[in-house]
Image: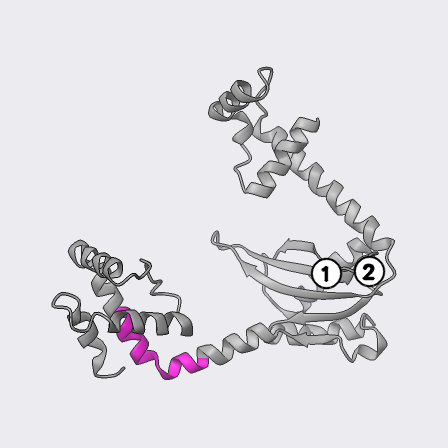
């Protein structure tokens, strides 16, 4: 059982597929280097071990929280997976028995329904009731989605906030900054599009990209491929500075000329 638990922890911590225990290549590795008596572990068995591991870790965390007398600050956000499934994550922040700031994920629940204030409230309340901490919540930090803001009234209706709820609703500063930056980038969207077009022009041809690599080497610059679908201020500045060094080049100069009229 200990070996299977270690396998389950390895899968979780390294993001391995749950059928790795029955892989013939994994078996070859373990039997050759570590344990000749290793027997493959089926996908079904590993799934059950993962569920058991989760329940054990959750129960240990519940016990740890119950032994503390501190208030807990929550952060929560809805996360979109590449599989098109939505999840709501609830993270707790608190001081442990040694007065160290600690954070733990209390819940990572599927949101297979509308992201309404009531649904958000209900999912978070399920998490709080699991850990028996509904009376110990100092604050909760959301982004600025309207449903999140509306859910705050539901928490007040259940008397969740402490000390009158003065500190209860906190707005995510990172989300606010991101909104400010995105609004600013819209003001220079034409320039950004031209930089993106120039980068795409270089990367769309193997000879042009080979010339790009040659120039990077000659100028002592680290070769990198820019993400053209992730606008960010520092990235735009780097694009501009790098391309500007190619202005006089007979091959890459054309890419810079494309931008000159508006940069």
Residue 128 visible here: yes
Can you tell which quarter of the image residue 53 is in? top right
Residue plotted at (74% across, 57% down): 127
Give percent across and percent down for residue 157: 79, 74
Report the disc number at residue 92. Answer: 1
Find out whether residue 101 is within the magenta segment.
Answer: no
Can you tell which quarter of the image residue 51 is in? top right
Give percent across and percent down for residue 68: 86, 57
163 versus 29 height, above or below: below
Give percent across and percent down for residue 218: 23, 60
Q: CA distance from mark 2 to mark 1?
A: 10 Å
What element does badge 1 sit on?
Answer: strand
Asked if residue 247 lies left or right of residue 195, the reply is left
Report the span colored magenta.
Answer: 183-197
Report the disc number at residue 133. Answer: 2
Give percent across and percent down for residue 206: 18, 54
Nearest-to-viewer mark from 2 and 1: 1
Contact? badges 2 and 1 (CB < 8 Å)? yes
Q: Nearer the viewer, residue 242 or 157?
A: 242
92 versus 13 height, above or below: below
Q: Nearer the viewer, residue 253 or 70?
A: 253
Q: Nearer the viewer, residue 228 or 140?
A: 228
Which of the two labelled residues, at mark 2 and mark 1, occupies the earlier sequence position? Answer: 1
Q: Quadrant of the N terminus?
A: top right
Q: Quadrant of the C terminus?
A: bottom left
| Residue that sits furthest to the left in the current view | 250
Residue plotted at (77% across, 62% down): 94
């Amino acid at each position: 059982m200990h070996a299977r638990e270690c396998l389950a922890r390895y899968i979780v911590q390294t993001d391995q597929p749950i059928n790795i225990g029955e892989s013939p290549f994994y078996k070859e590795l373990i039997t050759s280097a570590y344990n000749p008596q290793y027997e493959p572990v089926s996908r079904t068995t590993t799934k059950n071990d993962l569920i058991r591991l989760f329940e054990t870790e959750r129960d240990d965390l519940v016990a740890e929280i119950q032994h503390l007398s501190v208030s807990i600050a929550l952060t929560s956000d809805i996360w979109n997976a590449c599989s098109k499934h939505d999840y709501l994550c609830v993270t707790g922040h608190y001081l442990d028995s040694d007065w160290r700031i600690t954070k733990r994920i209390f819940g990572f629940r599927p949101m297979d329904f509308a992201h309404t204030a009531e649904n958000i409230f209900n999912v978070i309340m399920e998490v709080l009731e699991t850990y028996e901490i509904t009376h110990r919540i100092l604050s909760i930090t959301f982004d600025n989605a309207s449903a999140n803001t509306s859910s705050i009234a539901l928490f007040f209706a259940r008397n969740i906030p402490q000390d009158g709820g003065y500190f209860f609703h906190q707005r995510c500063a990172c989300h606010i900054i991101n909104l400010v930056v995105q609004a600013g980038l819209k003001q220079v969207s034409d320039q950004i599009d031209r930089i993106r077009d120039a980068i795409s022009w270089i990367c769309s041809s193997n000879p042009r990209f080979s010339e790009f690599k040659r120039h990077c080497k000659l100028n002592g610059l680290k070769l990198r491929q820019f993400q053209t679908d992730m606008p960010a201020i520092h990235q735009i500045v780097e694009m501009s500075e790098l391309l500007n060094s190619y202005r006089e080049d007979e091959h890459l100069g054309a890419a810079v000329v494309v931008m000159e009229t508006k940069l």
